[in-house]
Amino acid sequence: MIRKYPLAFTSLLLGLVSFVHLFGLEKAVIAVLLGGAAIRQAAPEQESGKKYAYAGVILGSLYILVLAVIAVKKGPAIFSMLGK
């Protein structure tokens, strides 16, 4: 499975790891990029490879969205603490 779809599986793995490691923003961005490349590269009959790639893109995007929401909600408080 891993040998058939290396980009898709790597995308899925990085999407999962971005949630485990604190501040995994770079991992999430790479997961989205690799997942997009795997989707474009996959042939129509490679449905399971596309599923892994879509999962990696979704997980990476979800992590980026979560960080954006946290930054908007907690950003002013963090900047006020840094100013003291």
Image (tube, helix red, strand yellow):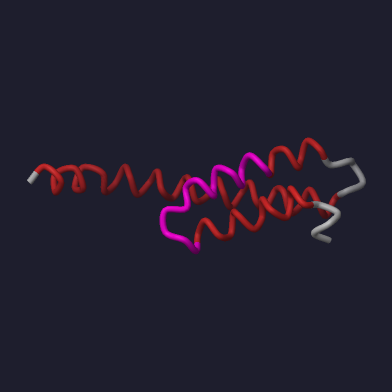
Residue drawn at the location 70% of the way across and 48% of the way down: 54
Q: Residue furthest top?
A: 40
Residue drawn at the location 80% of the way across and 59% of the way down: 2
Q: Main secondary structure of the magenta part?
A: helix
Tell me the quadrant of the picture where the N terminus can be found.
Answer: bottom right
Q: Residue furthest right?
A: 45
Q: Position of residue 73 (x, y in %)?
A: 29, 47
Left or right: 19, with 12 as reference point: left
Q: Position of residue 43 (x, y in %)?
A: 89, 41
Q: Is residue 5 magenta?
A: no
The number of numbered discs placed on residues in the rendered structure image is 0
Left or right: 59, with 52 as reference point: left
Q: Position of residue 61 (x, y in %)?
A: 55, 45
What segment is highlighted magenta in the picture? 20-34
Q: Position of residue 62 (x, y in %)?
A: 53, 49
Left or right: 44, with 36 as reference point: right
Left or right: 29, with 76 as reference point: right
Residue drawn at the location 50% of the way across and 59% of the way down: 19
The one nearer the camera, 56 or 23, is 23
Residue drawn at the location 47% of the way across and 61% of the way down: 21
Q: Residue furthest bottom?
A: 20
